Amino acid sequence: MELWRPGSSSTSLAGLLIFIGCAQFLIMLVVSSSLYPGYSISHNYISDLGATCRGSSCIVFQPSSVIFNTSVSLLGYLLVVASILLARSGSKGIFASLLLISGLGAIGVGIFPESYGMLHSISALITFLFGGLAAITSHRILEGPARLIGPSMGVLALLFLALFILGIHMGLGPGGVERILAYLELLFGVMLGGYLMSRS
């Protein structure tokens, strides 16, 4: 069964929210990274932008921290609202649920920066894991080339998540592997948002 009803305004609005959420976070990643003294895409984690913790010591650089935490929280809230709109448009599949969980994880990343320890790690894992799973199940709602591209991006994202967890960095550093993982899911979101908007 299709996830949307053709011409549904809820589907179009959901696509707009997903597009805005992912696009603004991609841009704010660049902005907050540029304002973080000595930030290394290779050696720093993405979440270091919110708070950098090593052992029992944490450092917060402003305005990078407030920009990152606000942006990732906004991403999460928009994904949650979009998933609800998709469900209201007629979804009985798993995609909207996976998107919802990923959005809740992103909200957790913004509310619980690295200084919160395990709460942050769990939130980040939820975001990446369920974001990748959502991309994989997107074949249920996509058509044409996008039906292959979306799930492929999800599989690659989960592959890089596994590499990140296992500490296999392939010369890219932990930050580099994490960035590829994040970019795969965010670019999927941008593509999905544009696709859903076009359905109306």
Image (cartoon, rainbow, N blue to C red):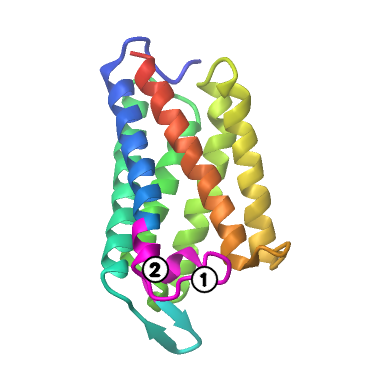
Quadrant of residue 87 within the rendered picture? top left
Q: Which residues are magenta?
A: 31-51
Residue 163 versus residue 77 in the image, above or below: below
Mark 1, residue position: 44
Asked whether 106 or 57 is in front, the reply is 57
Residue pictured at 44% horizontal, 40% vertical: 99
Identify the residue at horizontal 36%, vertical 36% (top origin). Answer: 18
Q: Residue 77, how many percent across, how many down?
A: 29, 47
- In space, the residues marked 2 and 1 are separated at their CA atoms by 9 Å
| Residue type at tag 2 | Leu
Q: Position of residue 20 (x, y in %)?
A: 31, 38
- Specify whether residue 190 is painted magenta: no
Q: Is residue 135 above or below residue 90?
A: below
Mark 2 = which residue?
49
Q: Viewed as shown, does residue 151 lie left or right of 50?
A: right
Disc 2 is placed on an element classified as: helix
